[in-house]
């Protein structure tokens, strides 16, 4: 797997890649603006009001080109009043998001509903969340490296 490099030309750590994903989430689900076409594909910015809406909109912003050769399942276990279990299945350059628990996910992410919303809004730093135990990851952590490109806004 090719490792992305930081501006200082060093490979990004797993935590830095996870942070990049959540920074992209913040913009991915912000109020609609600057939508359009970039490099031959539609770019979207989404508004959201609940945890469930975030997962419902993920397939709409999925970048098929970034998923070439990837077959993976990302499990999201969100706890709290708005919580639930969702998993994103990426196969044959398509993404489907389903409610429930997958039997054998490639990567599992667990956090509270408030922390998930805060991460997506950019109010909670992913590195801090991971280091403080607010975000728990299990499985192929390197998959997080591809998440900013998979759920890209352009």
Image (tube, rainbow, N blue to C red):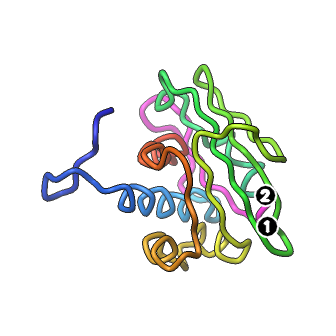
**Helix or strand or loop: what does disc 2 sit on?**
helix
Give the residue displayed 48% in from the left and 56% down from the top: 21
Going 64% across and 75% down the picture, which residue do you hit? Answer: 115
CB-based contact (under 8 Å), mark 1 and mark 2: yes
Left or right of 43, for residue 82: right
Query: Residue at point 65% right, 62% down?
Result: 110
Task: Give the label on residue 50, or none.
Answer: 1
Residue 29: image quadrant is bottom right
Total marks drawn?
A: 2
Q: Is residue 91 left or right of residue 54?
A: left
Magenta residues span 34-53
* Crowd rating for badge 2 (residues with CA inside 10 Å; few <14, some 14–19, many 20+): few
Residue 28 place in picture, x, y as percent: 57, 56
Horizontally, is 8 left or right of 58 in the view? Answer: left
Q: Is residue 45 or residue 85 the one in the foreground?
A: 85
Residue 51 belongs to magenta span: yes
Q: Residue at x 61, y 43 (%)?
A: 61
Return the residue at label 2.
53
Whether 69 is drawn above or below 131: the answer is above
| Label 1: element kind | loop
Q: CA distance from mark 1 to mark 2?
A: 5 Å
Mark 1 packing: few (<14 Cα in 10 Å), some, or many (20+)?
Answer: some
Residue 47 lies within the magenta run = yes
Which x, y percent locates residue 11?
A: 22, 50
Instruction: Name the spot of residue 19 as percent of width and height, x first.
Output: 43, 63
Single out the residue that lies furthest toward the left. 8
The N terminus lies in which quarter of the figure?
Answer: top left
From the top left corner, tell me how far across and down residue 24 is, in percent.
Answer: 49, 58
- Left or right, 126 with respect to 45, comes to left
- In the figure, 85 relative to 72: above or below? below
């Amino acid at each position: 797997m090719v490792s992305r490099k930081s501006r200082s030309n060093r490979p990004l750590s797993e935590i830095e890649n996870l942070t990049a994903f959540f920074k992209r989430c913040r913009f991915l689900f912000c109020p609609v603006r600057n939508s359009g076409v970039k490099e031959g594909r539609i770019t979207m910015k989404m508004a959201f009001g609940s945890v469930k809406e975030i997962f419902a909109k993920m397939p709409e912003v999925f970048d098929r080109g970034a998923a070439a050769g990837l077959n993976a399942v990302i499990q999201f276990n969100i706890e709290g009043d708005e919580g639930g279990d969702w998993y994103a299945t990426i196969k044959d350059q398509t993404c489907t998001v389903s409610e429930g628990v997958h039997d054998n996910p490639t990567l599992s992410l667990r956090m509270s509903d408030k922390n998930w919303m805060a991460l997506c809004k950019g109010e909670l730093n992913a590195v801090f969340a991971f280091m403080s135990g607010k975000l728990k990851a299990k499985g192929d952590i390197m998959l997080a490296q591809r998440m900013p490109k998979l759920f890209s806004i352009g």
